[in-house]
Amino acid sequence: IGDNLVSANQGNGIDLVTLEDGSIVRGNRIGTNAAGTAALGNAGTGIVVGNGSDENVIGGDPDDPLPASCGDYCNLVSANGAGISITVYGGTPGQNSVIGNFVGTDIGGTERLGNQDHGVVIQRPKVNLSRNLVAANEGDGVHISFSSSYGPSYTSTVQANLIGTAVAGMTPLGNGGRGLFVYHSSWNDIGGT
């Protein structure tokens, strides 16, 4: 699922739900204009992965660096009700990756186009959240909850993200809530490169 403009819808931007496995979501503008410079938000969440969906990739590959601007594989997910939500309600949580996206900024990673709620929400599944820019959202930058009930095999990795700054890591572009919030979620790997 790539190179789409998905904006101004009354629901979510992109939904991968109910055992939707192996999809790649890459290079989209979700909630902005085509240039990635102005808000044209979806009323719901920009990207939703849910209900046992597994092995989906939102953005780039594990070895890709955070881009200097949001092009190629990077999804620009801004000005929506919320940014990216990966949740499980019933069933077994899958492994999904969110790598190299801009969540809450413009295409250049320097201006505010925040989502109205949290930037990235992880509820119960196992997620590799790496090398993303998560800034200028009205809620928390990253919000993780209720993973512990599935045990240590289903916890998340949060590494090498920029949370609350512009893309160069030098200028404040804070989220409205906490940068990273973890609740009832043990065994996560937070930090490192």
Image (tube, rainbow, N blue to C red):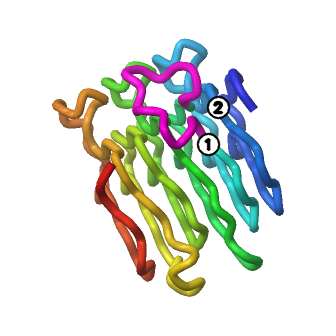
Relative placement, left or right, of 134 versus 147 is left
Q: From the image, which quarter does the N terminus lie in?
A: top right
Element at badge 2?
Answer: loop
Disc sitting over residue 26 in the figure: 2
Q: Is the residue 150 above or below the residue 143 in the image?
A: below
Q: Quadrant of residue 14?
A: top right
The prevailing secondary structure element of the residues shown in magenta is loop
Relative placement, left or right, of 109 versus 164 is right
View extreme (top): residue? 35
Total marks shown come to 2
Q: Nearer the viewer, residue 119 or 157?
A: 157
Q: Position of residue 99 (x, y in %)?
A: 51, 42
Q: Quadrant of residue 18?
A: bottom right
Q: Is the residue 53 above or below the residue 65 in the image?
A: below
Q: Quadrant of residue 171?
A: top left
> Residue at (57%, 38%) from the top-left corner?
61
Q: Amino acid at mark 1?
A: Ile
Q: Position of residue 13 (x, y in %)?
A: 69, 39
Relative placement, left or right, of 145 versus 20 is left
Q: Which residue is mark 1?
A: 58
Q: Is the residue 44 above or below the residue 100 in the image?
A: below
> Residue at (78%, 57%) from the top-left corner?
17
Disc sitting over residue 183 in the figure: none
Binning the other alpha carbons within 10 Å of mark 2 as few (below 14), some (14 to 19) or many (20 upward) gives many
Marks 2 & 1, CB-CB < 8 Å contact: yes
Element at badge 1?
Answer: strand
Q: Position of residue 177 (x, y in %)?
A: 31, 57
Q: Nearer the viewer, residue 176 or 126?
A: 126
Report the magenta residues as a range. Answer: 59-74
> Residue at (74%, 79%) from the top-left corner?
90
